[in-house]
Image (tube, rainbow, N blue to C red):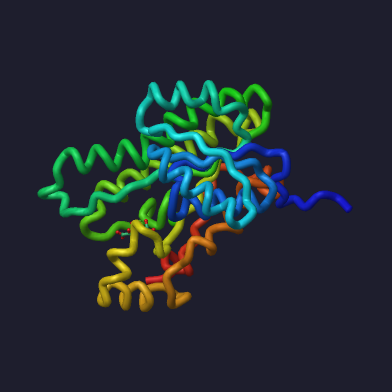
Amino acid sequence: MPASPFALTGRRALVTGSSQGIGLALARALAQAGATVVLNGRDPARLAAAAESLRAESIEVHTHAFDVTDEAAVVAASASLGAIDILVNNTGIHRRGPLETMPLADWEAVLKTNLTSAFLVARAVAPGMITRRTGKIINVCSLMSDLARPTTGNYAAAKGGLKMLTRAMCAEWAQHNVQVNALAPGYILTELTQPLAADAKFDAWIKARTPAGRWGSVADLAGAAVFLASPAADFINGQILTVDGGLSAVI
Ligand code: GCO
Ligand code: CA
């Protein structure tokens, strides 16, 4: 019986920002599909707790704490990470606020964390993928790579940039059999969106605006991530796979 085209057995995956939320769910999904997964975050204690939670589900993962926004830390980490076959650039934060009063610090923190980090980590792992002539990079974009709403100007700019960085990586690295694509979650219930879901008006708006009539769960993203990380997607390059219950398809 030939191996499933969705199997990730024998592949080593690094998921950045995987102590919680979408990152942790994507790490779980890749591990369950057979990958050896390395969790990443800045805080070793939170990382250990995340690994423990997966171990409780009989899922074994490694951890590597480093700050993906710190160039020196990324270069140092890549020296000890070993070969990475699948990179999921997931790290992301929000610093919501109106643009006219947004502190430069909030702008720069979001651009650095949500966009520059993807450049730094991909720049560190791509040479190995190029040498081995195989690799998968999945940038976690967003519905906000294409659509904006008030108070998220820094986040939308960063996620829009990440969409184009995905295409730029495709333009340079597809020739080396490195497939770079993006996963664009819509409104998914996580720590990042909890404050929005707790607002009855916003919650009702999302449910009315989304054809599926509900918020997504992090589990809704698992299959798309495994697919993009798998041999089944070897001829898919520079694409943005949106998982949003149909929100971006309708007015
Ligand atoms: C918001 C939300 C969004 C989601 C997601 C939507 O403030 O509107 O937090 O930014 O996080 O990115 O795709
Ligand atoms: Ca789109």
Left or right: residue 30 compared with residue 5:
left
Judged from the image, the quadrant occupied by ligand 2 is: bottom left
Residue 239: % across, % down: 54, 48
Seen in the picture, residue 215 relative to 14 is either above or below; the reply is: below
Can see residue 136?
no
**Quarter of the view holding residue 36:** top right
Q: Residue furthest left?
A: 101
Taking the spot 57% from the left edge, 30% from the top edge, the residue there is 173
Count of numbered labels shown in the rendering: 0
- In the image, 30 versus 162, the foreground residue is 30
Relative image position of residue 57 (x, y in whole percent): 60, 57
Q: Is residue 183 left or right of residue 45?
A: right
Residue 56's image quarter? bottom right
Residue 112: image x %, image y %?
Answer: 31, 36
Q: Is residue 92 visible?
A: yes
Task: Choose between 183 and 77: the one closer to the eye.
Answer: 77
Q: Residue at x 43, y 55 (%)?
A: 21
Report the residue at 41% width, 53% height from top: 142
| Percent of width and height locating residue 95 | 24, 49
* The image quarter in which residue 68 lies: top left
Q: Residue furthest right?
A: 1
The quarter of the rendered structure image containing the C terminus is: bottom left
Q: Is residue 55 left or right of residue 1?
A: left
In the displayed structure, 20 sits above or below 176; it is below
What residue sits 67% from the left and 51% below the top?
A: 33
